[in-house]
Amino acid sequence: MDSSQTQNTSLQRLQNVEKTIVRVLELAGGVMDELASPTGPRKEFINNHCREFMQMIKDIQFTLRNEIKSACEYRPFEKCDYNSRISNEICFTKLEFVISQLDAMKQAIDQYHDTV
């Protein structure tokens, strides 16, 4: 397998991780919606979503560890960390956004409970 094929499949794996992260956030939102339900949360629904959430988190960690290891194998310059730093900054910005969204969801839930 040449390096362009390796990079292509690596990008595909990372795109799948990105899609999985979106699904993880959807699951977390679904659980929050269920917890905020006026009729009360359904235990089986929450259990299933939490189980799926945890499995996806493990899958994400596994894939990212493998991608980090393989990235080191074909990195063109041994001491070049520009790509890593840029990627970290992008991830940090994305995480800040996710945290702000989760904070907003928490505030909405808190406001809902205050009005009930």
Image: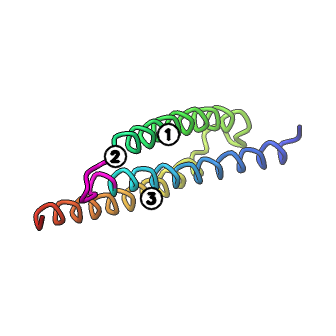
- For label 3, the crowd category at 10 Å Cα-Cα, with few meaning under 14, some 14 to 19 and many 20 or more, is few
Quadrant (top left, top right, bottom left, bottom right) of the N terminus:
top right
Q: CA distance from mark 3 to mark 1?
A: 22 Å
> On the rendered structure, is 55 left or right of 101?
right
On the image, the x and y values in percent for residue 39 come to: 26, 56
Q: Is the residue marked by circle 1 packed among few (<14), some (14-19), or many (20+) residues within 10 Å?
A: some
Comparing labels 3 and 2, the label whose residue is closer to the camera? 2
The residues tagged by marks 1 and 2 sit, at their Cα atoms, a distance apart of 16 Å
Which of labels 1 and 2 is toward the front?
A: 2
Question: What numbered label is drawn on residue 42?
Answer: 2
The main secondary structure of the magenta stretch is: loop
> Which residue is at the front of the view, 47 or 92?
47
In magenta stretch: residue 46: no
Q: Residue at coordinates 29% horizontally, 48% vertically from top-left?
A: 41
Q: Secondary structure at mark 2?
A: loop
Residue beneath the point at 38% across and 62% down: 97
The numbered disc on residue 94 is 3
**Above or below 45: residue 107:** below
Q: Amino acid at mark 3?
A: Lys
Q: Do callouts 3 and 2 mark residues in contact (Cβ within 8 Å)?
A: no
Q: Which residue is mark 1?
A: 52
Which residue does the image show at 60% across and 39% down from the upper left? 79
Residue 31 place in picture, x, y as percent: 36, 50
